[in-house]
Image (cartoon, rainbow, N blue to C red):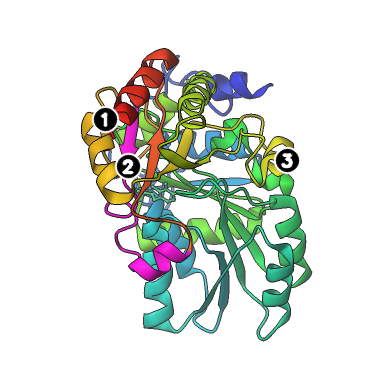
Amino acid sequence: MRFDTKLIHAAQPPDPLTGAVNVPVYLSSTFAQSAPNRNKGYVYSRSANPTRTVLESALATLEEGSVGLAFSSGLGALATLLESIPSQARIVADTDLYGGTWRLLEHHRRTFGVRTDYVDLTDLDALRASVAGGTAPTMVYAESPTNPLLRVIDLAAVAKVAHARRATFVVDNTFASPALQRPIPLGADIVLHSTTKYLGGHSDVIGGALVVKSKSRGERLRWLQNAVGAVPSPFDSFLVLRGMHTLGLRMRAHGAGARAATEVLVPSRKVRAVHYPGLASHPQHRVAARQMSGYGGMVSFELTGGLPAARRFLRSLRVFTLAESLGGVESLVDHPASMTHASVPRAEREAHGVTDGLVRLSCGIEDPADLADDLRTALGSV
Ligand SMILES: *Cc1c(COP(=O)(O)O)cnc(C)c1O
């Protein structure tokens, strides 16, 4: 099956009991047993729930992994993954990370002494130097495209360097979604998602996922998923599945919106830099063209006028809503320095380019001409 067909049919047969074409929402915390430990595969919904099972199998198929695990949030997925890492471990992570991811990695570093180094993973020599010295890393962690600067990591190349030192390569694929990029066939061992974003796609649910390449590692993480208990409800599992059906269609529309946005932003004198992997001027455009089948709906840019310009710009938008999060059908705008990345100290933030003039757009599926008009008007007010 091709990807758009998998979205509808993979691991989602009609319900065997009733023929329902959508998996029922099994609102049951527990399941009857015919004798102690004799059951139909379900015992207690923290361990497994039939609605969640369909979501997990569909996620594994879409990301081309062996085991899919759903969580109550993206950070719930990350926290569970970090439970699998011993305190004497070493993590090498990219410098550009979702703020909440950085916060949790730092918590593990400070509280449990996990050695964590932040390295620019677009610089393969820097990565090689970092993993060659000292303790071999246990885990190499990257987002691609990154949040909020849309840098693109060469996943196949980083996988090779990580595997040469037997490290696990984890990719947060939230920004691309499996519709545009599949890290596991490129060499990743584990894919992480905030299903809150493109997979859910409608800004109506918080969720997360891990998809694991190796079956045995997947089963160990499934044990931790139950032990930790950060699982999604059956209804939340249904909402993510429901949203996923249209992922292919939506990603094409998000991409069209983002292209329209760049056409307004790039020529503007009020904009210093536009970060979008689809632009030929993007430093990793060729890597993106090779490993992605589209460039996605996220665009960030820097206003030359800094914070005052950003404030005026944000106040003038009508179609874009000022809100955290991304990946929903409606266009959202974010001011990373004061919102999503406020937990990162200023010096650290500015050193990686998250300045006060930086604005991040999540282009929705509205008519791209309306997105362009809205941006043009707001730039006019700056
Ligand atoms: C939102 C997000 C997360 C965290 O996911 P939650 O569902 O909010 O817990 C992790 N990584 C990226 C790239 C995100 O955008």
State the residue at coordinates (44%, 35%): 269
Residues at marks 2 and 1 touching, judged by CB atoms closer than 8 Å? no
Q: In terms of image quadrants, where is residue 196?
A: top left
Q: Amino acid at mark 1?
A: Ser
Report which quarter residue 376 is drawn in: top left
Q: Is residue 234 above or below residue 104?
A: above
Rendered view: 300 above or below 3: below
Q: Is residue 337 magenta?
A: yes
* Horizontal and vertical percent position of residue 194: 42, 45
The residue carrying pointer 2 sits among few (fewer than 14), some (14 to 19) or many (20 or more) residues within 10 Å by Cα, namely many
- Percent x, y of residue 304: 39, 45
For the residues carrying marks 2 and 1, which lies nearer the camera in this image?
A: 1
Residue 129 vertical position relative to residue 33 in the rendered view, above or below: below
Q: Can you tell which mark lies on residue 381?
A: 1
* Label 1, ligand 1: CB separation under 8 Å: no
How packed mark 1 is, by other alpha carbons closer than 10 Å (few <14, some 14-19, many 20 or more), is some
Mark 2 or mark 1, which has the lower sequence index? 2
Residues drawn in magenta: 330-351
What quarter of the picture does the C terminus occupy? top left
- Element class at badge 1: loop
User: Would you name the residue on which mark 3 appears?
Assistant: 286
Q: Residue under circle 2?
A: 334
Residue at 71% across / 66% down in the picture?
162
